[in-house]
Amino acid sequence: MSLIDLITGNAGTQVAEQAENKFGIQKNQVIALLAVAAPLVISYLRNKSQDANEAEALNQALDRDHDGSVLNDPSQLEARQQEGGSILDHIFGGQKAQVENSLSEQTGISMNKIGPILGMLAPLIMGYIGREKQSNGVNSGGLGDLLGGILGGAQNQAQAQPSNPINDILGQVLGGGQQQQSSGNPLNDILGQVLGGGQQQQQQGGLGGLLGSILGGR
């Protein structure tokens, strides 16, 4: 399963419907948020996995808590929202508030809802990584390459299908991240380069314009 399949397939759609019912926001807003949040989370984890201790901790967490079964039963994600918040606390650390603020500005999801929705999405993203880890027989030493391969594969697929708004969003997000790899900071790489322009980015088109198209001009 590719990252795009996760976002646009059954699991992504079901969690978006859950969030729509619980928080009263558009389903497409949640799908657009997942399209940006998933590569951001994976980029952070790839960055962390360069440290052997972090890689082993991630490997153990995936083996223990994220076997991918959530992809077959996304209905459990609402109940795992608090767990998802803890996952994001660990991944983003002191930058979590900045991440949430940037994502809120770009998707139109209010700050009081963005955190809880991300909390629902986090176990889904981790479950996807866990399934890919199992499928590829990867241990802690190979996690960085696995995560990089997920991002690279999604970028290639997105660029091959530019007519799809979700693919366009992923193409911009992943393209910005790949081009700015040398900074070593996924937040700056992705949010700073692609999302950080805020209203200016929306005026120029870019990701703001793409989000506007999928959200129906919001």
Image (tube, rainbow, N blue to C red):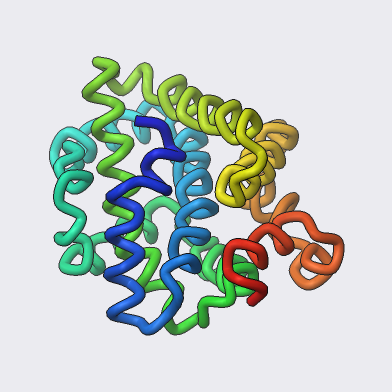
What residue is drawn where x is 24% and y is 68%?
82
Q: Is residue 64 left or right of residue 169?
A: left
- Does residue 184 appear in this view? no
What residue is drawn where x is 50% and y is 80%?
111
Residue 146 locus on image (x, y percent): 41, 23
Between 130 and 11, which is closer to the camera in this rendering?
Answer: 11
- Does residue 93 appear in this view? yes
Q: Is residue 117 left or right of residue 167?
A: left
Q: Is residue 53 left or right of residue 69?
A: right
Residue 37 locus on image (x, y percent): 49, 54
Residue 128 locus on image (x, y percent): 30, 39
Residue 120 locus on image (x, y percent): 30, 63
The N terminus, quarter of image: top left
Indicate the quadrant where residue 79 lies.
bottom left
The C terminus, quarter of image: bottom right
Between 85 and 94, which is closer to the camera in this rendering?
Answer: 85
Indicate the quadrant where residue 126 lies.
top left
Between 125 and 63, which is closer to the camera in this rendering?
Answer: 125
What residue is drawn where x is 59% and y is 32%?
155
Give the residue furthest to the front.
163
The vertical placement of 129 against 149, above or below, is below
